[in-house]
Amino acid sequence: PTLLLTYVPKENNFPRSFFKLAGSLVNITSLLAVQPKSKKTLTKSGVKNIVVVEGVRIPFLQSGTSYADLMPHDLARAALQGLLNRTSVPREVVDYIVYGTVIQEVKTSNVAREAALGAGFSDKTPAHTVTMACISSNQAMTTGVGMIAAGQCDVVVAGGVELMSDVPIRHSRKMRKTMLTLNRAKTLGQKLSLLSKIRPDYFAPELPAVAEFSTSETMGHSADRLAAAFAVSRLEQDEYALRSHTLAKKAQDGGLLLDVVPFKVPGKDTVTKDNGIRPSSMEQMGKLKPAFVKPYGTVTAANSSFLTDGASAVLLMSEEKALAMGYKPKAYLRDFVYVSQDPKDQLLLGPTYATPKVLEKAGLTMADIDVFEFHEAFAGQILANLKAMDSDWFAQNYMGRKSKVGAPPLEKFNTWGGSLSLGHPFAATGCRLVMTTAHSLKKEGGQYGLVAACAAGGLPKCVLGP
């Protein structure tokens, strides 16, 4: 989708930001508390102003650590409570709650509803759950935007949650079929007859895999092939991954990750920061073996995002409602559009396809963007996109464009780290991208930011905001 996002400074008279999302790519532009470089506005006459009031996330942790004994709705509840604590918004004011998730817990299939009830929201507050791979919380946000724009709601909470520490592992289909039939058997003879048909291979479990259903290929394999197609070396990937961890550590130590809220884990200590940030050395990273394409692949555990637990939440309002309640919006959401590509060969190229669409719709160029925030699924995926964006040949032969859009300059790109270092709880990452961009723009005095994220299924999403 393409979503328009704007920050209103203290004077309350600056142009509003444009926040665009497009499938696996998200681009955000946000105007924050400094004098903008220009007075250009991206507002649209007759379109209701929709704002981001605040956004938070609990610390993103490597799977199997402090959140391992919890359930997804526990994490989502903590994010909701963190948002309530930071904003002091009355629960009864919230008209609707939308949450994204990818790996669903069958006991809480509508995790939005269970988390909302756990966080103390009224049972009269509707809530539903969406899924769109790694852009699920982006889908949650744009769903909220649509509800507010349509006049159905004034206040919506959107977010995302993922708990990779505990994923569903199923019996084989043969065993499931036998057990369901056994449940309907009426006599002891019928039950014994069914049980006698069970064979040892029935007990083999069906393990979950981060793979495309349409291609049966894991995303890691796709990343390896993409890196090879664009001649991205192992050395380049390791250097980029080290950059991500180094910048994330600097941002964490400098108190820049303002969206993180502490979470008191039941029976354990309070978690206050992300635990996957681990700057290493090129020498140590070079010792790791290929993780997917063996023995000659270039994607390793060190240059890939890791399995992560976490949750996030943002508070969306109509401008009128926010101002009436005394809130100073952090960003305005203006528009959104989703695009998609071939899920086999172009699975992770969403940012390349979505970025020019967002910029053209906003009437901007790459040079107008002050902050770039792209989701880092793999270092090879990021670097391949940057090469594709900077290629006239790719633009002409694959995108039907006369010329390239151009690659973002690294001094403006993911300067506080990214998913490689901060972590990637699939459905929760979108909200982090949005809030990181907003806070970074404010600190740097920027006017426009571009956020992008690739997602499974070849669904790119792009967000832009002034």
Image (spheres, rainbow, N blue to C red):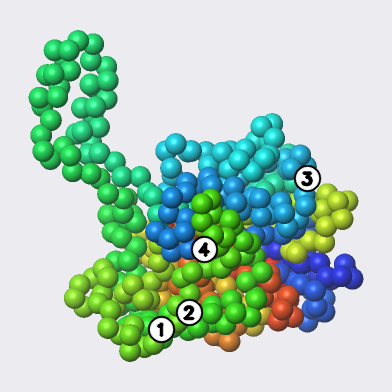
Mark 3 near mark 1, Cβ–Cβ under 8 Å? no
Residue 126: x percent and y percent?
65, 35
Residue 27: x percent and y percent?
60, 67
Secondary structure under badge 4?
Answer: loop
Could you say which quadrant of the image residue 380 lies in?
bottom left
Disc 1 designates what residue?
Answer: 280
Can residue 341 be seen here? The reply is: no
Q: How many marks?
A: 4
Secondary structure under badge 3?
Answer: loop
Mark 1 near mark 2, Cβ–Cβ under 8 Å? yes
Amino acid, disc 4:
Phe
**Is 208 on the left or on the right of 417, as rendered?**
left
The residue at 78%/42% (across/down) is 93
Amino acid, disc 3:
Pro
Residue 387: x percent and y percent?
44, 81
Secondary structure under badge 1?
Answer: loop
Q: Residues within 10 Å of mark 1 (few under 14, many from 20)?
A: some
Q: Is residue 284 above or below residue 222?
A: below
Disc 4 designates what residue?
Answer: 60
Disc 2 designates what residue?
Answer: 245
Q: Residues within 10 Å of mark 3 (few under 14, many from 20)?
A: few
Amino acid, disc 1:
Ser
